[in-house]
Image (spheres, coloured by chain):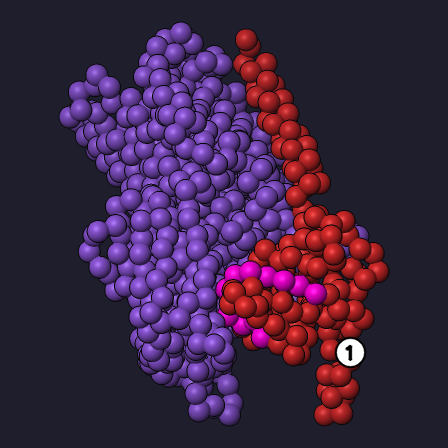
Chain colours: A red, B purple
C-alpha cells in the first residue's frame, strides 16, 4: 500500500467511524431522550403511559402526603394551568418542600398517576433547573407583588 | 490595598502576555534572535505576576475581607479555614483566575524547562500560549473582576454553597483545572509546530510529557469528582452522566486518544496530521467544558445561575481559538509530510483502533450532552438525555476499547502476524472465557453488559501484565511499567463498575430507634436520633451500629445538616468500607410517628472503581517520569558528544 493510500484509508476510516457514531447516537436518542413536560403540557396532550418523561413544576401547597409505609410520598405538581399527581418512593431531596420547584424523572401509569424514579429539587438559592426557567408557576401572583414594590 | 494590588498584578500579567505574544509573532516574522531570547523571561514574569494575583485573592478569602464583593458572595467569617481557602475557586471569578494562573504557570514552565524543542517552534508555542491567555485575561478584567470592592461593607458574607463545603472541593477543581489547562500546552505545541512546519518524532517526544502530565491530573480530577459526587450527593451513584461530569470526561477521552497517538508519532513518525488534530480537539473540549459549566446553560446539579454576558464572552473566545486553530490546521495540513507506513495488524493498527473508538465515544458523549440545547434552540422543545442513552451508546464501545487495550501492547510495531498475537493472548482469553462461564452459571440477574464487562476485566487484568512476560524486569523501562499499571487500573475499575451495577443491594425503610435493618450480611441497629452542631451548621444525627456477619460492631452516624448562612440542607451519608465492598447509609426525613427514612446500600467491590482510577493515574506518572529521565539522558549524551567533537 502506498503512503497516499494509507492516509486516504485512515481518513475514510475516521469518517466512517464518526458517521457510525452519529447514526448510533440518533438511534439511541430516539429511544432514550426523555421529553420535558409541565402539568399543562400533560393536560393538553397526554404522553403515552410508560414513556420516559421529565415533569417539572411547583409542589402545590398542602399537597404532600406520606404513606403509611413511611417511605412513599404523594404530592401534586402544578403550574399556572394544571395539576399533576405524583408518587415517589425514596428519600426526598434535601430541598423538597411545598411551594418550591421540582423536576421529576419517571413515567405516567395507566391511571394517569406520574410515577417518579428520581426527584430533583432546587439545590440552592441561585440554582434553578433549566426547564423551570420562564415558566410562570405562581399564577402571576409574585409578578404583581414585584410591580407594586 | 490587597485587592488593588491583586488587580494591578493581574493587569501587569495581561500586559506581559500581550508582550509575550508580540515578541513571538514579530520575532518569528522578522527572524529576530534577540526577540527569541527575550520571550522566555517574559513568559516567566507573566507566570509570576498572575500567580501573585491569585495568591492575593486567596489571602483575601483567608482573612474574610468583607469589602470585596466576591468574598461577600461566597464566604462567611464563621467557616472552617479549609473552606475559606477552597472557597477562592468555588465560584465563577475565582475559578477563572485559577484558570489563567495555571495557563501562565504552564507558559513559565515551558519557558524554563523545555529544552528539546527547536527554538522557533518553542517561540511559536509560547506566543500561542500567550494568545490563549489574553482572551481569558480580557474575560476576567472586563466581565468578571474578582477583586471588585463592595460598598457599603456588609457585616458578614453569604457563605459558600453547602454542597461545596467538603474536603473534596479543596482538591477536585484545581486538579481538574491543571488537567484542562495542561492541555492548552498540547494545543499551543500543535499550533507552534504548524506555524513553523516542524511536525515529526522530535516534536512528539517534546510534547509527550506535557500531554501525560495534563492527562494524569484529569484522571485524578475525574476520579476524585466521581467519589465526591458518590458520597456527597447521597444518591448512591458514582457517575450520573451529568453535563458537568461529561464536561470533564470529554477532554479526558480526547487526551487519552492524544496520549496514544503521540506515542505513535514519537516512536514511528506516523499519524502526524491526526495527532495535531487531536491536540487541537483536546483543548477545545476543555474550553467547551468550561463554557458549559461557566455559562450555566445546562440543567445540572452544579450549574450556576444563568449569566448571558459571560456565556457569550466564553462562546466568542471558543469561536476564535477553536476556529483559528482549525483554520490553521486546514491551511497547513497539506504541508505536513506523509508519515511512515504500517500494516493493519501492528501496534500502530491497534493504536489507530484505540483512537477511533475513543473518538467515537467522545462524539457520542458530545452529541448527548449538547443535543438538548440544540433541540431547544431549534424547536423550543425541552428534553433531557440521561444515563439510558449514554450507557446504551457508549457501553459496548468502551468494552471493545478495553479488548483492544489487552491486545495492543502485545503487538509488534509496523507489522505482526495475527496467529502470533493469538498465541500470546491465549491465556487471557481462556481466563475471560472461564470467568464468563462461571458468572453465567453461578450468578443471576446480571445484565449482559455487566456480565461481559466483568469477564473481560478478568482477562484484561492478566493481559495487562503480559508485556512483562519473559522480559528482564530490571532492564524493562519505567514507561513500560507505567503502561502496564495504567492498563491494569482500567481492568480494576471495570471490575468495580460491573460489580456495583450487578450486585448492589438496597433497602429503604421508615425505622424507629430500636429497629433493626438487615441488608445482605449486614445487621444495622438504629439506636437514636440526636442533634449535633458544627462550626457553621446544625444537624440531626442517627446513631447506628453495623455488623457484618459475626464481625466487629462499627458505629455509623449518617447526618442531615442544616447550614445557617444559606438556609440549606445536605445529607451526609455514612460509609463503612470493607475489603469486599462498602456500606452506604443515608438518613432522610422524620415523620409525625417518630419514624425516620433510612436508605441502606451494600455495594460489593465499589471502591475498586476509584482505586482503579488512582492506579491509572499512577501508571501515567511512572510513564512520565520514565520518559523525562530518558529524554534528559539522551540530551546529556548528545551535548557531551557535541562538546567532544
Q: Is residue A86 magenta?
A: yes
Q: Which residue is mark 1?
A: A139
| Residue B476, image x, y percentages | 21, 25
Q: How many marks?
A: 1
| Residue B31, image x, y percentages | 47, 41
Q: Is residue B241 above or below residue A135?
A: above
Which image quadrant is residue B80 in? bottom left
Front position in the image: B505 or B63 = B505
**Residue plotted at (50% across, 70% down):** A94
Q: Is residue B162 above or below residue B445?
A: below
**Residue plotted at (70% across, 59% down):** A113
| Residue A17, image x, y percentages | 61, 27
Residue lying furthest left: B474
A39 to the left or right of A102: right
**Residue B387 appears in the rendering:** yes
Q: Is residue B203 magenta?
A: no
Which image quadrant is residue A95 in? bottom right
Amino acid at each position: 500500500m502506498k503512503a497516499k493510500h494509507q492516509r486516504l484509508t485512515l481518513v475514510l476510516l475516521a469518517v466512517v467511524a464518526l458517521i457510525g457514531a452519529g447514526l448510533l447516537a440518533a438511534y439511541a436518542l430516539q429511544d432514550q431522550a426523555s421529553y420535558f413536560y409541565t402539568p399543562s403540557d400533560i393536560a393538553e396532550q397526554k404522553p403515552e403511559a410508560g414513556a420516559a418523561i421529565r415533569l417539572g413544576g411547583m409542589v402545590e401547597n398542602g399537597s404532600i402526603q406520606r404513606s403509611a409505609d413511611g417511605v412513599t410520598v404523594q404530592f401534586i405538581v402544578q403550574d399556572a394551568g394544571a395539576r399533576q399527581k405524583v408518587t415517589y418512593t425514596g428519600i426526598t431531596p434535601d430541598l423538597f418542600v411545598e411551594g418550591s420547584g421540582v423536576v421529576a424523572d419517571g413515567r405516567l401509569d395507566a391511571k394517569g398517576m406520574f410515577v417518579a424514579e428520581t426527584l430533583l429539587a432546587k439545590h440552592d438559592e441561585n440554582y434553578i433547573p433549566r426547564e423551570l426557567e420562564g415558566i410562570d408557576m405562581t399564577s402571576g401572583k409574585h409578578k404583581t407583588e414585584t410591580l407594586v414594590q | 490595598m490587597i485587592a488593588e494590588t491583586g488587580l494591578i498584578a493581574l493587569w501587569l500579567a495581561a500586559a506581559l502576555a500581550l508582550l509575550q505574544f508580540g515578541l513571538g509573532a514579530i520575532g518569528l516574522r522578522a527572524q529576530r534572535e534577540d526577540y527569541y531570547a527575550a520571550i522566555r523571561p517574559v513568559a516567566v514574569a507573566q507566570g509570576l505576576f498572575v500567580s501573585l494575583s491569585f495568591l492575593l485573592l486567596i489571602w483575601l478569602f483567608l482573612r474574610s475581607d468583607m469589602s470585596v464583593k466576591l468574598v461577600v458572595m461566597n464566604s462567611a467569617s464563621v467557616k472552617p479555614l479549609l473552606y475559606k481557602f477552597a472557597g477562592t475557586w468555588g465560584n465563577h471569578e475565582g475559578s477563572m483566575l485559577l484558570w489563567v494562573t495555571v495557563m501562565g504557570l504552564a507558559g513559565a514552565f515551558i519557558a524554563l524547562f523545555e529544552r528539546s524543542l527547536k527554538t522557533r517552534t518553542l517561540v511559536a508555542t509560547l506566543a500561542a500560549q500567550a494568545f490563549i491567555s489574553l482572551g481569558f485575561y480580557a474575560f476576567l478584567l472586563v466581565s468578571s473582576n474578582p477583586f471588585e470592592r463592595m460598598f457599603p461593607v456588609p457585616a458578614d458574607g453569604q457563605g459558600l454553597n453547602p454542597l461545596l463545603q467538603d474536603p473534596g472541593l479543596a482538591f477536585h477543581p484545581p486538579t481538574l483545572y491543571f488537567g484542562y489547562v495542561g492541555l492548552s500546552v498540547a494545543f499551543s505545541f500543535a499550533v507552534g509546530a504548524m506555524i513553523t512546519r516542524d511536525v515529526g518524532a522530535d516534536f512528539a517526544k517534546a510534547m509527550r510529557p506535557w500531554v501525560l502530565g495534563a492527562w494524569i491530573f484529569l484522571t485524578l480530577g475525574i476520579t476524585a469528582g466521581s467519589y465526591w459526587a458518590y458520597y456527597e450527593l447521597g444518591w448512591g451513584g458514582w457517575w450520573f452522566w451529568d453535563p458537568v461530569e461529561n464536561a470533564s470526561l470529554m477532554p479526558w477521552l480526547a487526551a487519552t486518544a492524544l496520549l496514544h497517538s503521540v506515542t505513535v508519532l514519537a516512536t514511528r513518525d506516523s499519524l502526524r496530521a491526526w495527532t495535531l488534530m487531536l491536540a487541537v480537539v483536546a483543548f477545545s473540549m476543555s474550553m467547551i467544558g468550561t463554557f458549559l459549566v461557566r455559562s450555566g446553560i445546562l440543567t445540572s446539579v452544579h450549574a450556576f445561575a444563568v449569566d448571558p454576558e459571560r456565556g457569550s464572552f466564553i462562546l466568542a473566545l471558543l469561536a476564535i481559538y477553536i476556529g483559528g486553530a482549525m483554520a490553521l490546521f486546514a491551511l497547513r495540513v497539506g504541508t505536513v509530510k506523509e508519515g511512515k507506513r504500517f500494516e493493519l495488524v501492528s501496534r500502530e493498527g491497534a493504536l489507530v483502533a484505540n483512537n477511533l473508538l475513543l473518538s467515537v465515544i467522545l462524539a457520542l458523549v458530545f452529541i448527548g450532552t449538547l443535543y438538548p440545547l440544540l433541540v431547544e434552540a431549534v424547536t423550543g422543545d425541552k428534553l433531557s438525555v440521561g444515563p439510558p442513552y449514554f450507557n446504551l451508546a457508549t457501553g459496548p464501545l468502551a468494552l471493545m476499547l478495553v479488548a483492544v487495550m489487552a491486545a495492543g501492547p502485545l503487538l509488534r510495531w509496523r507489522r505482526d502476524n495475527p496467529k502470533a498475537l493469538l498465541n500470546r493472548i491465549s491465556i487471557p482469553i481462556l481466563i475471560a472465557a472461564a470467568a464468563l462461564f462461571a458468572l453465567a452459571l453461578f450468578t443471576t440477574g446480571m445484565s449482559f453488559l455487566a456480565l461481559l464487562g466483568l469477564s473481560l476485566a478478568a482477562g484484561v487484568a492478566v493481559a495487562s501484565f503480559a508485556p512483562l512476560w519473559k522480559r528482564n524486569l530490571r532492564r524493562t523501562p519505567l514507561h513500560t511499567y507505567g503502561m502496564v499499571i495504567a492498563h491494569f487500573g482500567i481492568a480494576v475499575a471495570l471490575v468495580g463498575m460491573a460489580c456495583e451495577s450487578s450486585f448492589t443491594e438496597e433497602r429503604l425503610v421508615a425505622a424507629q430507634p430500636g429497629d433493626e435493618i438487615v441488608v445482605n450480611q449486614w445487621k444495622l441497629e438504629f439506636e437514636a436520633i440526636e442533634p449535633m452542631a458544627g462550626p457553621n451548621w446544625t444537624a440531626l444525627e442517627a446513631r447506628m451500629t453495623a455488623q457484618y456477619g459475626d464481625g466487629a460492631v462499627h458505629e455509623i452516624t449518617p447526618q442531615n445538616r442544616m447550614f445557617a448562612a444559606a438556609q440549606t440542607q445536605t445529607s451526609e451519608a455514612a460509609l463503612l468500607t470493607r475489603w469486599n465492598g462498602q456500606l452506604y447509609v443515608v438518613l432522610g426525613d422524620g415523620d409525625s410517628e417518630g419514624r425516620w427514612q433510612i436508605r441502606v446500600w451494600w455495594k460489593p467491590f465499589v471502591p475498586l472503581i476509584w482505586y482503579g482510577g488512582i492506579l491509572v493515574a499512577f501508571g501515567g506518572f511512572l510513564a512520565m517520569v520514565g520518559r523525562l529521565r530518558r529524554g534528559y539522558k539522551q540530551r546529556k549524551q548528545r551535548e557531551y558528544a557535541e562538546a567532544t567533537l
